[in-house]
Image (spheres, coloured by chain):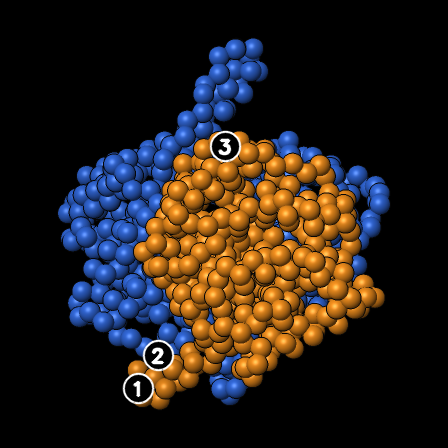
Chain colours: A orange, B blue
Amino acid sequence: MNKKEIIKVIVFLFILFVIMFFLFKILWLNPTAISLFYEEPKNSLDIVFTGASTTYRSFNTVLAYNLYGYTSGILSSSAQPFILTEYLIKESEKYQNPSLYVIDIGRVGNGPEADEEGNIRTNTDSMKFSKNRTDAINAIMEYKNIDSKQYANLNFSFLMYHNKWKSISKENIVGAKNYYKGYSFLDKSAVIKPIEKYTWIDDEIELQEKNEEILNSLINYIKDNNLNVLFIVPKKIYMEDENKRINSAIKIIQDNNMNVVNFNTIEEFNDIIDINTNFYDNDHLNVYGATKYTLYLAKYLNENYEFKDHRNDANYSSWSKEYERFKSSFKKITNKEFDELLLEYKNI
Amino acid sequence: MCLTTFTFIAFCIITLFIYFIIPKKFQWIVLLVSSVTFLFWDNFNIETIIQALIVLMSAYVFGRLIDKYYDTKKAKRFLAFGILIILAQLIYLKYTNLFLTTFNHIFNLFGIKYQFGLVYRNSLIGISYYSLIMISYMTDIYRGTCKAQKNIFKCALFMSYFPILTSGPFIRYDSVGKEMYKEHKFNYNDMCYGLLRILWGVFKILVISQRLGIFVDNIYTNIGIYNFLLTFLAVLAFPLQLYTNFSGSIDVIMGISEIMGIKLPENFKLPFFSRTITEFWRNWHITLGAWLRDYIFYPLQKSNVMQKLNKKCKNIFGKKIGKKIPMYVSMVIMWILIGLWHGGAYTYIIGSGILQFLFIFLEDILSPASKKINDKLGINTEVFSYKLYQIIRTYLLFSFAMIFFKATRISNAIEIIKSMFTFNLGILSKKIILSALGMDLYDFAILIVSLLTLFIVQLLARKGSVRGKLFKQNIIFRWGIIYSLIFSIVIFGCYGVGYNATAFIYGQF
């Protein structure tokens, strides 16, 4: 090849890769709470939440900021596989230096069969390409006993998303904004749907062997890295075995001198949550329930941990803006001022 | 290893990279190592090693002996031994079940309860190709067309040349074989031409063939569910699916070889523009037809049995008809073998064998009458409309035969034919059509656009090399076309796990 030909090849490949890069971006998974987590300024978060949808549909991060001035990031996804918690915390450690991690253990009692591909991908495909992402994929492949032929498919997800050209979202092209800083406030969240019979039992059955290993590995990682962690069990309907396994997990965590808040057994919290009007469905609080939950948990966090108050810091103005956005959305949906609701809940 | 996988792309890149950076005298060794790796990639065990060695050792040893005793009776005997061993293994591995099912049917006919159990043989990729290629290698030595290869490793390379193992074409030692051992310098133009051909091949496979396959498979697996129009459409679509898949694979194979400087024989020459089935088969899987013509048909015609038959027939039926009968007999044998080569099932023997022969036979015997009728009616056979009629007729006949080729059983093929002629429109709603197509409107639009692209490219190809024309264009147009091709494959290709939007919508919570 002569010089001219070499230049031609380089230019051709350069253009190809540039177009490919944008194409991959456009045809990728729609932005998620996890992919938007990267957009928060470095070391700007005081708390990072991990867990399933119970996290981002319950904890109103902008309300907590408005009340106490600390910032919370959401590294959660729908039915987030518990095995990914450790890898997500590792990912968070690369970009943030939070004072506290709040880990939702609502799915610790679910076996590998409960972690569906879509729920795995929402996490792994939202993570940036790195060794940690590959480790997370390897771990879930081993956990779920996924055929090794799927390795390329999970690692290089374009094999899957290239077919998404039929349903490209606006967010894929222009980028998405982290509205309400991770709190998911859908119109539907305001709709009240009756919940099935709610129970919580205190009996225990052993965690599945693999799940216990995962929990112990997470605890060891937390200890080795001196992380400050609060485990929480969200209030929702659980299957009986799931409930009993969570009790086992709570015991393991407490035996390791770590703090767990089980919202199913706190009487004070149960007294303020109305099963009939504060739930969207069996698993999720509606906006009223989420407000009560946030008021309760935000106060708990403020009383038990130390965080900086950023409310007067201009660098954090986006948090106030998002709180205002939330309030205006709330009004649009409920025809009610959010401040009025806060007045109603002032005793929480 | 499938031709359109990332593993194959990586495999080719590594092979090509090493091929051009090492000293040229070792290039053939790189090819040999790659070919052997490819051959055993999915199936490496003692059984498959023995299978490959049987073919290699028979061709090598008997090839040398034939060469040594050239032009003697011994050479003929050695050739027969060599062919017998290779054929025996091929028949054992590929056709045992065909024989067993035939016996089972016969037993059933005579009320015998005993049934043979079917056996599943573990055979190597490309066994049908390299077995026949090595038979032609020995025959060519016997005929004096080429000399035997003294280096067994070079002989092994000719047998296992990796690009051709999946889809051919059939190669000959005197032309392609020797090319493999030559030293090849990297050529920028060869690379560009080769890569463009590979891209076009991948486009045909992933964008067109796989998409058509969704529709065709849907109809063939749900026989009788969809109305006659949709069944008819699927029957017409299958030859296109087969062509885009097969010729696409050949494009990939030719492109890789072209980059390495090895020119392979063409296997397709715009078959769907053929005006008769005879012409169609001159343009479809050309190298298989040529192989069977040179190594089966001609030797059969020249054999003592056929010569005697020729004489007898001439005495009984006269010179004109008499000389045709032995030719038809040889043709029947050849077409049955073509059917058998495609697979050890009666559907293949009928679809790509007997029916094809029947069409050619009818064309041959009816052509004088047809000519007379045309002359009497004053039909101009050289105008576009008549040529178009002939092209459509050929396509319809080929499509009809392919019903048997595609169907898993003869009874299924008959069911398909029945549902084609059960003129019941039923409810032909958009929903039913899309359900039959197995794709949404977006995918259907892509299919139509890509078929139109194929048609335009084929029209251009009739007037010379499309690649040649493209590379003469200005860089912006040229690169625009190449990028469009690449991104069409990347975005619209049917590969990987399909993105299922509903799964993600459900996963909202």
Q: Residues within 10 Å of mark 3 (few under 14, many from 20)?
A: some
B13 to the left or right of B406: left
**Which residue does the numbered mark 2 point to in the structure image?**
B188
Which mark identifies residue A148?
none
Q: Residues within 10 Å of mark 2 (few under 14, many from 20)?
A: some
B385 to the left or right of B48: right
Is there CB contact under 8 Å for labels 2 and 1? yes
Residue at image point 49% right, 24% down? B101
Instruction: Indicate the amino acid at tag 1.
Output: Asn
Q: Chain of mark 2?
A: B
Does residue B354 show up?
no
A212 to the left or right of B184: right
**Which residue does the numbered mark 1 point to in the structure image?**
A2
Viewer-side label of 3, 2:
3
Instruction: Indicate the amino acid at tag 3.
Output: Glu
Alpha carbon separation for disc pair 3 and 1: 74 Å
